[in-house]
Amino acid sequence: MLVDFNELPDTSRVWIYQANRSFTKEELEEIQEKLEVFINQWTAHGADLKAGFDIKYKRFITIALDQDLNQATGCSIDASVHFIQKLENDYKVDLMDKMNVSYKQGEFVAYKSLTDFRKMVKNRSVSPNTIVFNNLVTNIAEYKTDWEVPAKDSWHNRFLN
């Protein structure tokens, strides 16, 4: 059951998928339609799941699930992963690789491998105040406060020393 992302409770679980490139306007429209269809049909052992999605910076797809109604199960999580993998294939984009870092460079969102990000820290191209995206947040409350933060306030800080 699709609901507006902003109407979901702060305790709702989130999964964030970061693309290795920006989506075009046309791709975003198609992806939004596909997300609406998927979420409207998404169930856990036949029970409706109350969920929504958010797309930010033409690059991040966040799916949120209100677990107060029904919890995600292994099968429902598998279904969402298969859906994301289909998007990867349809749009020739990487959404599942967790070994990459996205961060802000002015108004732009940059995407680098973890190795390249470490090199940039060494070269002082990235500072403790560089805004990074912490895709490890687990619920909407964290998404609102801890997703887009200075590197020093995220797991990325381990590379700053």
Image (cartoon, rainbow, N blue to C red):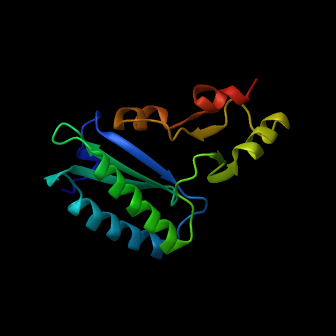
Front-most of 148 and 90?
90
Quadrant of the image occupied by residue 160? top right
Is 62 rendered above or below residue 150?
A: below
Q: Is residue 14 above or below residue 90?
A: above
Residue 111 spot, x, y in % from top left: 66, 52
Residue 24 horizontal/vertical position (percent)? 52, 71
Q: Of all residues shown, which one is farthest toward the right?
A: 123
Front in this rendered view, residue 155 or 3: 155
Point 37% across, 43% down: residue: 14
Left or right: residue 14 compared with residue 111 = left
Apparent side of residue 105 relative to residue 13 in the rendered image (left or right) = right
Rendered residue at 28%/52% (across/down): 76
Identified at 27% across, 44% down, the residue is 72
Image quadrant where one finds the C terminus: top right
Q: Total label count? A: 0
From what the image shows, is residue 14 above or below residue 34?
above
Counting from the top left corner in percent of width and height, residue 69 is at: 15, 41
**Is 48 positioned to the left or the right of 57 in the image?**
left
Name the quadrant of the N terminus. bottom left
Seen at 24% across and 43% down, the residue is 8
Horizontal side, residue 7 vs residue 131: left or right? left
